[in-house]
Structures are given as C-alpha cells and as structure tokens.
Amino acid sequence: MVHFYSAIYTPPANSDWVKWFPDEDERDDWTHRLANLVPLHVRKNPAASNYDFATKKNVYFKGKGAVSPFVLTQEVRSEETWTSSHLTGRQERLVGVLKAHWNLEVATDNKTADAVATAATGGLAS
C-alpha cells in the first residue's frame, strides 16, 4: 500500500495538495489513514514520486503495467480530485467493508468498550 499524498515532503504552494488541504495539520491527518492508501506494484510508487494527484494517476495508470489487479486502485482512475470530503466518504466505506467482513464492533461509549474488552479477553478484563 502506498500513500496518494505523502507527508514526507512539503508540497509547493501552488500544489493541488495545498489547494485541497490548505491546513497542514489536516493534510498530515489524512496521510496514513486507510482512505489515502492504495495497493500498487512496488515499482509504481517511486515513479510517481511526490507529484500532484493528476500526475500520480498518469504514472500509475499509463504505460506498461497500467492495469492494476486491485479494485481499490482501479477506483482511483475515476477520481478527479483527492479532497478531504472524498477521503471522508472513502474512509467510511472502507472501514464499513472491514467491519462487515470481519464482524468487528466499534465501541461507541465506555460501556460498550468494556463489554468488547471483556469478550475479547474471555472475561478477564477488569
């Protein structure tokens, strides 16, 4: 999995990343979240470097090896932007898929969290 936006570098002021995420903390918050990750062949990510979204898409989906076997990667082809509103929806959808697939419960309060912890430890949680 690779990051579509990477926090390792500081994007130029005229970058799409700065336009779409003017707040640096918000950019950093999204960097390592599931919604910002896409599975790619090991050679594709270095070729795309830290370019803007459109350039990364071009590198990922043009030329030799342009078709990815990963559905999550193919979904990116149809996107024109990679904004927080898009990532929010993608994050909710992907977490929902994982919750359903693995029958995960999400603790919404301390009472639920305690019950989940108790069940997970076979009743040994205090």
Image (tube, rainbow, N blue to C red):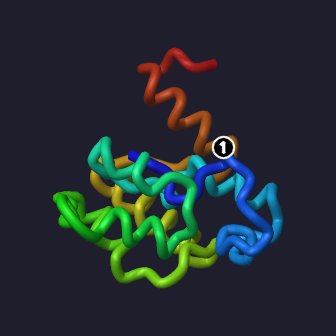
For this rendering, which residue is in front, 100 or 93?
Answer: 93
Residue 90: give x, y in percent of width and height: 47, 69
Q: Is residue 90 above or below residue 100?
A: below
Q: Report how many numbered discs are placed on residues in the image.
A: 1
Which image quarter: residue 5? Answer: bottom right
- Locate the C terminus and report the quarter of the image it occupies: top right
Q: Which residue is mark 1?
A: 8
In the rendered structure, the answer to whether residue 4 lies left or right of residue 24 reads: left
Q: Is residue 69 above or below residue 87?
A: above
Residue beneath the point at 47% across and 70% down: 55
Residue type for callout 1: Ile
Helix or strand or loop: what does disc 1 sit on?
loop
Q: Is residue 17 above or below residue 111?
A: below
Residue 120: give x, y in percent of width and height: 44, 27
Which image quarter: residue 112? Answer: top right
Residue 20: give x, y in percent of width and height: 69, 76
Residue beneath the point at 54% across and 80% down: 81
Residue beneath the point at 57% across and 55% down: 50
For this rendering, which residue is in front, 23 or 113?
Answer: 23
Residue beneath the point at 49% across and 60% down: 35
For this rendering, which residue is in front, 78 or 8?
Answer: 8
In the rendered structure, the answer to whether residue 31 lies left or right of residue 119 reads: right
Residue 93: give x, y in percent of width and height: 43, 68
